[in-house]
Amino acid sequence: MAPTPLHTSRPLAAALLAALLTACGTVENLTPGMPRAEVLSRWGQPTRVVPVPGGERLQYSFQPTGQEAVMVDIDAAGRVVQARQVLNENDFARIALDGSWTQADIGREFGPPAYVGAVGRWDGPVWTYRWRGGMVDQMFYVYFDPAGRVRRTEMGMDPRQFRNMR
């Protein structure tokens, strides 16, 4: 079964967010101690806001068409603790495959996926993230069991890059 888009109206929003971020700066412009209001002023409304210990996380996701997801952690006083782009090999490597990570954990750490789908020989949902690995457009797949626990992950090439090879 082919993956189904999680967000059907997101491509335009992702393009607008990309343009906004290009105009306003990069993750490096989000410095520790910066007030939450300044983050919102520079970056606009986040894709989602999720609770984290000691505060909240503003998620700025470029999914489903983009390749980045920026997490901005805000403390209880309303100031930036850290900001980082999380769709990368080092952050993916943090995911444990022993069932201790759940769909909520993946959503909190990486934001909403580009697609949620299923594969024939797997009895649970598969979340797909687009990301840029080196010079190659890639996909990162997170396989959940029926109880919503991570049991497998894998990386593959983004099929969009093959369109231009015909």
Image (cartoon, rainbow, N blue to C red):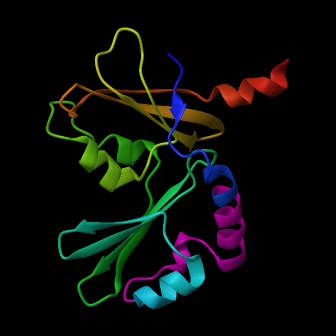
Horizontal side of residue 131 vs 143, given as left or right: right
Horizontal side of residue 84 vs 73, given as left or right: right
- Give the quarter of the image for residue 80: bottom left
User: Is 31 one of the magenta-colored residues?
Assistant: yes
Q: Position of residue 103 (x, y in %)?
A: 27, 42
- Residue 134 vertical position relative to residue 61 in the rendered view, above or below: above
Q: Position of residue 132 (x, y in %)?
A: 59, 43
Residue appearing at x 50%, y 41% in the figure: 6
Residue appearing at x 64%, y 57% in the figure: 14
- Label the magenta part by its dominant secondary structure: helix
Residue appearing at x 53%, y 70% in the figure: 27
Residue appearing at x 53%, y 31% in the figure: 4
Horizontal side of residue 165 vs 80, given as left or right: right
Residue farthest along the top direction in this orientation: 121
Horizontal side of residue 166 vs 37, given as left or right: right
- Give the quarter of the image for residue 154: top left
Query: In front here: 46 or 88?
Result: 46
Q: Position of residue 50 (x, y in %)?
A: 31, 65
User: Is 89 one of the magenta-colored residues?
Assistant: no
Q: Position of residue 92 (x, y in %)?
A: 37, 42
* Number of numbered discs visible in the structure rendering: 0
Q: The C terminus is located in which quarter?
A: top right
Residue farthest along the front direction in this orientation: 8
- Residue 26 vertical position relative to residue 118 in the rendered view, above or below: below
* Region in magenta: 14-33
